[in-house]
Image (cartoon, rainbow, N blue to C red):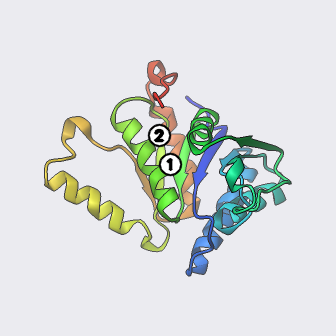
Amino acid sequence: MTEIRNICVYCGSADGRDPAHIAAATELGRLMAGRGVGLVYGGGNTGLMGAVARATLEHGGHVTGIIPEFLKQREVMLKSAQELVVVPDMHTRKRLMFERADAFVALPGGVGTLEELVEQLTWVQLDQHVKPVLIADIGGFWRPLLSLFAHMREAGFIRPVTEVRYLVAERVADILPMLEAAAARAPAAAKALSPEL
């Protein structure tokens, strides 16, 4: 069985309009800390990013923030993280986030969150790694994207041989059990794969 030691959480640097989204980020941080699972994230102290990181820290968990130099002020770098890595660009940030994580979760967010999620889904689709990717569909936030994936299948652009493999959780409480079950099923020979960036 593959152990989930660190989860990379992609999410918005804004609060959003639905209080359930901040609540979900806070709950996820608390649950991760309680299970001894570290957080790898974008290093900011604003929005859902800040909420999940602060909750992880407040409940005794380990936080690794990875932030590009140019975002240190805009996303208000979280200086209380146990490990804070400042990198020169977004490409380096995403590569390190991938390398340090055993699984990925997408909470609600904007274009940046979408881009990070879709990149991971593409790498899984192309068999570049087998780390679980989970879409946290809190309050139906990601439903339009899931509908788009269904439309792509119907239109023949996502075929059975190139299926996009992901998990969907509607409740935060289901995230860790789903990731652990998926990691346990991952073929051992494929665990060391790493995408070409």
Quick one: which residue is furthest to the left in this view? 155
Under tag 2, what secondary structure?
helix
Q: Looking at the picture, which amino acid does disc 1 mark?
A: Met
Q: Mark 1: few, some, or many residues within 10 Å (few <14, many ≥20)?
A: some
Locate the N terminus by quadrant: top right
Q: Looking at the picture, which amino acid does disc 2 mark?
A: Ala
Q: Mark 2: few, some, or many residues within 10 Å (few <14, many ≥20)?
A: many
Q: Estimate the x, y position of residue 143 in percent, counting from the top left.
A: 36, 67
Q: Residue at x 45, y 32 (%)?
A: 130
| Callouts 2 and 1 close, C-beta under 8 Å | yes
Per the image, the residue denoted by label 2 is 182
Per the image, the residue denoted by label 1 is 178
Q: Estimate the x, y position of residue 118 in percent, counting from the top left.
A: 41, 49
Q: Residue at x 58, y 36 (%)?
A: 102
Under tag 1, what secondary structure?
helix
Residue 150 position (above or below residue 191) = below
Distance of label 2 from label 1 (alpha carbons): 6 Å
